[in-house]
Amino acid sequence: MADKKEIYADGIGQIHFAGNMVRFDFMTLQPGEDGAAPTPVMHDRIIMPPQGFLAAFNSMQQLIDKLLDAGVLKKNEKAGK
């Protein structure tokens, strides 16, 4: 793991489908000048085939379920209404 690169992102700025691939644009929040609100800046992109995207989505859903069970996250009952 010593030779692996670690990437930090505050979130995903955009997810889009182009050229038969799913593209995630990761962003960080850069401080604004003189107390202005931070500005999101795209810095890295991950591109994967739809099958890889689906596998990643399923893995994330499983982690969300574990975090809900552990009480780390709480369901938003108003979502989807």
Image (cartoon, rainbow, N blue to C red):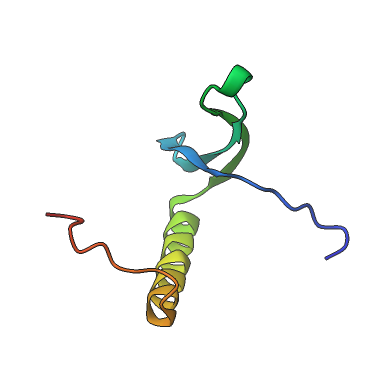
Considering every residue shown, the one lying at the far right of the view is: 2
Residue 77, compared with residue 50, is above or below; it is: below
Residue 60, compared with residue 25, is above or below; it is: below
Q: Residue 62 is drawn in which quadrant?
A: bottom left
Identify the residue at horizontal 74%, vertical 53% (top origin): 6
Considering every residue shown, the one lying at the far left of the view is: 81
Q: Residue 33 is drawn in which quadrant?
A: top right
Identify the residue at horizontal 62%, vertical 28% (top origin): 31
- Taking depth in this image into account, of 45 and 47 the one nearest to the observer is 45
Q: Is residue 3 left or right of residue 54?
A: right
Considering every residue shown, the one lying at the far bottom of the view is: 69
Q: Is residue 26 left or right of residue 53?
A: right
Residue 69 placement (x, y as % from top left): 39, 81
Q: Is residue 79 left or right of residue 26?
A: left
Could you tell me how many numbered marks the image carries? 0
Identify the residue at horizontal 34%, vertical 69% (top origin): 74
Residue 29 placement (x, y as % from top left): 58, 34
- Taking depth in this image into account, of 1 and 27 the one nearest to the observer is 27
Considering every residue shown, the one lying at the far top of the view is: 34
Residue 36 placement (x, y as % from top left): 54, 21
Residue 34, compared with residue 56, is above or below; it is: above
- Taking depth in this image into account, of 17 and 59 the one nearest to the observer is 59
**Quarter of the image containing the N terminus?**
bottom right
Residue 28 placement (x, y as % from top left): 60, 37
Q: Residue 78 is drawn in which quadrant?
A: bottom left
**Quarter of the image containing the C terminus?**
bottom left
Residue 8, compared with residue 65, is above or below; it is: above
